[in-house]
Image: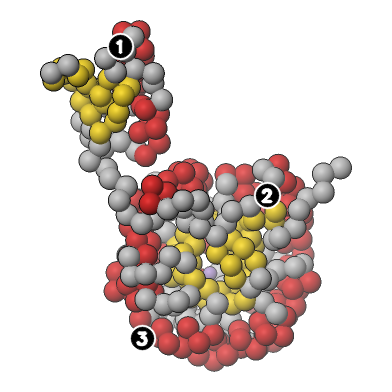
Amino acid sequence: MLILLKNNAAEHDITRLIESIKQSGYSYARHREGRTDMIELEGAPAYFQLDFFKSFPSVKKVVTSLDFSEKVYRANKKGDTVISAGGRRIGGKNIELIAGPCSVESFEQTERIACALSEMGVKLFRGGAYKPRTSPYSFQGLNEKGLKILSEVAKKYKMAIVTELLDVRNIDKVCEYADIIQIGTRNASNYPLLKEAGKLKKTILLKRGVSSTIKEFLLSAEYIMCQGNSRIILCERGIKTFETAAYRTSLDITAVSIIKEVSHLPVIVDPSHSAGAWNLVESLSLASVAAGADGIMIEVHDKPQEALSDAGQSLKPEKLKPLIEKALKIAGCFNKTFMGRKERLK
Ligand code: PEP
Ligand code: MN
């Protein structure tokens, strides 16, 4: 990376810039080519550092091999992408809530949960029919029967369906029932699947791979976008780190802010899969709203002890109510609506 300096740059500002470069851990060399003074840095900078270096008065231009030519970047689209689904908008000035069970287990279970959520104003109902389980011996989902249950229940409560597409062979079936198609963390780098999703006229909720960098995550979205589908919701759901405390993955809140900065696509957070523990879901949800997320996706089960998947992270419906009220307040601080509602400030 090259930092080109202005001809009349003040030496004290250049010294400040070099100090920052050193503090960021780069080795550097100062050159002069013709009449231009420049600083050459080794290594690829993070996105936010580009802007930071550009902010020094002595800097004329930052030249980097990082190009932002992909469609996912703000450089290539004016304004935020806003997705409409189930009569709600994800992105822009609204923060949305997607909620529902991890898996569709039966008509009765799905109906009970949908009924409770509908009373709280939830419009986007999630539920897995095809389940990506770590163990092949765990419940794998009800498959097409699950989609039919989702469809019946969602129709009754006038909700939109968010459900996972696991395998390219099920595209037609999932498309028939889903309003928003989820591509899960395990498939975040399944490029043939992403390309097919790019050919659909459906919104795709793309989760970040547990080991994907932000750049890799955005390039996964690019696989969808370059096929013509720009209806994409990005979802941060935690990444693998060295942490061994009793939670599943580390929620990368920083990624939310960074992605919002560089990409026009809406970004939501899934605190449930990130934490793997219901008692952490509220705080992670609120932190996500404060960090600028465009939505949160929460797993809810009225009888978590009986859930066939992700029992430990499923929130009881009555625990969602106070979370919604608190999220509404935080959204209000940023002059945003939550689930289409505006907090009336007293
Ligand atoms: C899910 O949403 O049910 C799921 C399996 O999520 P993830 O892909 O994030 O593990
Ligand atoms: Mn789950």
The residue wearing badge 2 is 336
Mark nearer the viewer, 2 or 3:
2
Can residue 79 be seen in the rendering of this structure?
A: yes
Left/right of residue 135 with respect to residue 317 in the rendered view: left
Q: Secondary structure at mark 1?
A: loop
Q: Name the mark on residue 8.
A: 1
Reading the chain from its start, which is encountered first: label 1 or label 3? 1
Reading the chain from its start, which is encountered first: label 2 or label 3? 3
Left/right of residue 30 with respect to residue 14 in the rendered view: left
Q: CA distance from mark 2 to mark 3?
A: 39 Å
Mark nearer the viewer, 1 or 3:
1
Crowding near the residue tagged with mark 1, few <14, some 14–19, many ≥20 C-alpha atoms within 10 Å: few
Left/right of residue 10 with respect to residue 287 in the rendered view: left
Q: CA distance from mark 2 to mark 1?
A: 43 Å
x and y, in percent, of residue 229 in the image: 41, 69
Q: Name the mark on residue 322.
A: none
Left/right of residue 344 with respect to residue 207 in the rendered view: right
Q: Does the CB distance between marks 2 and 3 fall below 8 Å?
A: no
Reading the chain from its start, which is encountered first: label 2 or label 1? 1
Q: Secondary structure at mark 3?
A: helix
Crowding near the residue tagged with mark 3, few <14, some 14–19, many ≥20 C-alpha atoms within 10 Å: few
Can residue 314 be seen in the rendering of this structure?
A: no
Name the residue: 48% across, 75% down.
Answer: 202
- For the residue marked with disc 1, what is the amino acid? Asn
The residue wearing badge 3 is 169
Name the residue: 41% across, 25% down.
Answer: 55
x and y, in percent, of residue 173 in the image: 46, 88
Q: Quadrant of residue 290?
A: top right
Q: CA distance from mark 1 to mark 3?
A: 62 Å
User: Is residue 29 placed above or below 195 in the rendered structure?
Assistant: above
